[in-house]
Image (cartoon, rainbow, N blue to C red):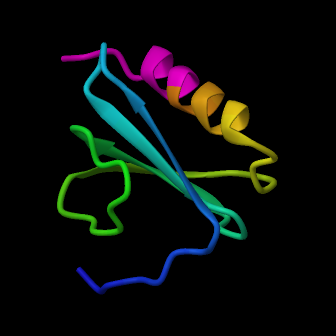
Amino acid sequence: MKPRNYGLPCAWHYLPERDITVRWGRPDIAFTVHSGDQRGTRGDHALLDTVPVARAWNDDHDVARKARDWARANPPR
């Protein structure tokens, strides 16, 4: 996979009940979902999904909401 540069600032939100981390760079047009606690990382080795978004995040609450929304829409198998 081709490495990519993520926007700054970057925000992470870890959902322990699902063991996933959402990572979202401020100007990025998508957020990424990773397995495990990936807070503070920029690698894609644990990438589960890339989700397009219409606008950048405003604050950490936006990132947390996207993490919960993704978890609800993608139940564990």
Position of 2 relative to 9 (above/below): below
Task: Based on the picture, tell me whether residue 76 belongs to the magenta stretch.
Answer: yes
Q: How many labels were placed on the picture?
A: 0
Residue 76 in percent (x, y) is at 25, 17
Residue 11 in percent (x, y) is at 56, 52
Q: Residue at x 64, y 26 (%)?
A: 65
Q: Residue at x 77, y 56 (%)?
A: 56
Q: Residue at x 60, y 74 (%)?
A: 7
Closest to the observer: 59 or 23?
59
Closest to the observer: 16 or 32?
16
Q: Is residue 49 left or right of residue 60?
A: left
Residue 27 in percent (x, y) is at 72, 70
Residue 1 in percent (x, y) is at 23, 80
Closest to the observer: 64 or 54?
64
Magenta-highlighted residues: 68-77
Residue sticking out furthest to the front: 40
Image quarter in which the C terminus is found: top left
Position of 57 relative to 69 (above/below): below
Task: Based on the picture, tell me whether residue 23 belongs to the magenta stretch.
Answer: no
Q: Residue at x 31, y 20 (%)?
A: 16
Q: Is residue 72 left or right of residue 43?
A: right
